[in-house]
């Protein structure tokens, strides 16, 4: 898995590509979780993600908890239909601000 990092107006944008599973979750956690130590927000852009396992969901749950504790907002973008279905079935969709694209996610962050 590759993870692209970008920033726009102080908001960190993390874009994992490939599979987020037991093998790649530690790398994703190492990149994502420190982003809640400051900044204006975090967007995770799923455009390049083809699969997410329970290990990947666990990282996102940790991120949601860190977001709440730190006050650094979190939004998700570009979830493929199959990944969005996993979020809906598991109840994770209720835990996150989810947008159709990166710009909409950035707008969700700016709106609070």
Image: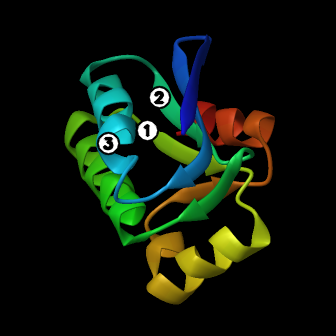
Query: Element under label 2?
Result: strand
Q: Is residue 1 above or below residue 80?
A: above
Tags 3 and 1 in contact by the CB under 8 Å rule? yes
Residue at image position (56%, 56%) is 97
Q: Can the viewer see residue 94 in this picture?
A: yes
Residue count near mark 2 (Cα–Cα under 10 Å), binned few <14, some 14–19, many ≥20: many
Residue at image position (66%, 48%) is 46
Residue count near mark 1 (Cα–Cα under 10 Å), binned few <14, some 14–19, many ≥20: many
Which sits earlier in the primary sequence, circle 2 or circle 1? Answer: 2
Q: Can the viewer see residue 14 in this picture?
A: no
Q: Which residue is mark 2?
A: 41
User: Looking at the rendering, which quadrant does residue 56 occupy?
Assistant: bottom left
Residue at image position (60%, 30%) is 110
- The mark total stands at 3
Q: Which residue is mark 3?
A: 67
Which sits earlier in the primary sequence, circle 2 or circle 3? Answer: 2
Which sits earlier in the primary sequence, circle 3 or circle 1? Answer: 3
Asked whether, in this view, residue 100 is left or right of residue 65, the answer is right
Q: State the CA–CA distance, disc 2 to disc 1.
A: 5 Å
Tags 2 and 1 in contact by the CB under 8 Å rule? yes
Q: Which residue is mark 1?
A: 73
Query: Element under label 1?
Result: loop
């Amino acid at each position: 898995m590759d993870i692209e990092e970008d920033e726009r107006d102080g908001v960190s944008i993390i874009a994992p590509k490939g599979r987020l599973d037991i093998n790649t979750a530690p790398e994703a956690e190492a990149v994502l979780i420190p982003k809640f130590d400051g900044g204006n927000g975090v967007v995770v852009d799923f455009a390049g993600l083809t699969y997410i396992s329970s290990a990947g969901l666990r990282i996102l749950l940790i991120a949601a908890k860190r977001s709440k504790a730190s006050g650094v907002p979190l939004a998700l973008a570009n979830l493929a239909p199959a990944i969005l279905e996993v979020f809906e079935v598991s109840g994770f969709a209720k835990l996150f601000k989810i947008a159709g694209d990166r710009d909409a996610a950035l707008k969700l962050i700016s709106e609070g």
